[in-house]
Image: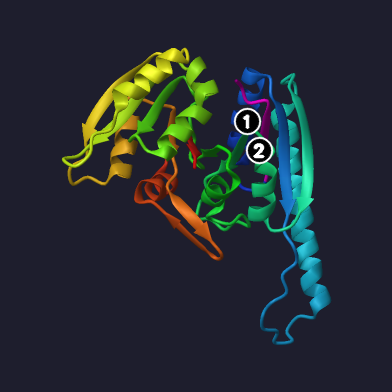
């Protein structure tokens, strides 16, 4: 079992180089076919037009911006794969980025996206990682916009609570877990429920992964914050977790842990729904 095909989302974000470097590292490790996907968004005329610009001028701005973003994205991808000796190609598709990337992710073993910095202007939708993870049925690796240690996946923190989502994430992440030097299964216990972390460790052992259990009591601390704290304590370079939530038309509902990690992540997060 391995990631035979990896899709990396290529936009004009300032942190694109780090994301693509990690994508190239993983493609080299697993002998994957790497696709650098850039999505050109459709032209969206203003809902209200006051006549200060003619529509031709607005479309010219759209064309210039789209062309500039595409050049930035594809140049970054070419730089990331240069001299790496990996099987790679770039693709350019048109349409709303959430829909296009979700459809493309369904035909890949892993999709890599970037955490969106909401404090900086960007053309990429801020909820892109969770939309793709919830809608595609495939695992998604989210790379923070802050600097991270490379290579990733040597010291992995696997979040486990016995749920379908955590089991799915652990199963999808097996290629990474098998090559990791250290895997810690993080299980949170409460008075009402205790996760069967020992069963998870036994299952991992049968799949060639030696893992240790770290049982934690969340108490009054928000679980997402506690995950980030334990990741820092253990010096983990990757978090594996199930993402909780559902999508509806024009609405997305996320669980609190998923929301916290996607907002405040300091290491890459491998997630599956």
The answer to whether residue 266 is seen in the rendering is no
- Residue 20: where, in percent of width, then height? 64, 34
Q: Position of residue 175 (x, y in %)?
A: 55, 21
Q: Is residue 246 found left or right of 94 in the rendered image?
A: left
Image position of 216 (left or right of 142): left
Foreground residue, 220 or 81? 220
Residue 73: mark in rendering: none
Q: Which numbered disc, 1 or 2, marks the residue that appears first in the sequence? A: 2
Which colouring convention does the figure follow? rainbow
Q: Which residue is mark 2?
A: 8
Neighbor class of circle 2 (other Cα within 10 Å; few <14, some 14-19, many 20+) is many
Quadrant occupied by the N terminus? top right
Residue 210 lies, in percent from the top left, at 40, 13
Specify few, some or many for label 1: CA neighbours under 10 Å numbering under 14, 14-19, or 20 or more. many
Q: Residue at x 62, y 41 (%)?
A: 16
Asked whether 273 or 79 is in front, the reply is 273
**Residue 185 falls in image quadrant:** top left
Q: Which residue is mark 1?
A: 23
Q: Answer whether labels 1 and 2 touch (C-beta < 8 Å).
A: yes
Label 1 to label 2, Cα distance in Å? 7 Å
- The magenta-colored residue range is 1-10
What residue do we see at 58% from left, 48% from top? 132
Picture quadrant where residue 184 is located: top left
Residue that protrudes farthest toward the bottom in the picture: 50
Q: Residue at x 22, y 45 (%)?
A: 221
Residue at 76% across, 57% down? 66
Say whether residue 9 is magenta: yes
Find numbered disc 2 in the image and state the secondary structure of the residue it sits on: strand
Disc count in the image?
A: 2
């Amino acid at each position: 079992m391995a990631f035979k095909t990896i899709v990396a989302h290529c936009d004009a974000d300032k942190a694109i180089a780090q994301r693509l470097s990690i994508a190239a590292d993983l493609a080299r490790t697993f002998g994957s076919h790497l696709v650098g996907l850039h999505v050109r968004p459709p032209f969206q005329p203003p809902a209200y037009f006051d006549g200060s610009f003619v529509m031709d001028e607005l479309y010219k701005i759209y064309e210039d911006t789209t062309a500039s973003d595409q050049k930035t994205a594809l140049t970054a991808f070419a730089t990331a794969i240069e001299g790496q000796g990996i099987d790679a190609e770039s693709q350019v598709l048109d349409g709303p980025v959430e829909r296009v990337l979700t459809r493309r992710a369904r035909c890949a073993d892993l999709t890599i996206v970037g955490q969106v910095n909401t404090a900086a202007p960007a053309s990429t939708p801020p909820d892109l990682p969770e939309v793709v993870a919830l809608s595609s049925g495939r695992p998604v690796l989210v790379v923070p916009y802050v600097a991270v240690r490379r290579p990733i996946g040597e010291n992995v923190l696997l979040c486990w609570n016995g749920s379908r989502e955590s089991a799915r994430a652990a199963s999808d992440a097996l290629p990474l877990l098998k090559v990791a030097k250290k895997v810690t299964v993080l299980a949170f216990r409460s008075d009402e429920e205790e996760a069967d972390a020992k069963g998870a460790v036994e299952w991992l052992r049968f799949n060639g992964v030696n893992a240790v259990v770290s049982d934690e009591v969340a108490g009054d601390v928000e679980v997402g914050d506690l995950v980030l704290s334990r990741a820092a304590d253990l010096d983990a370079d990757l978090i594996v977790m199930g993402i909780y939530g559902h999508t509806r038309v024009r609405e997305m509902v996320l669980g609190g842990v998923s929301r916290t990690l996607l907002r405040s992540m300091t290491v890459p997060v491998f997630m599956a729904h």
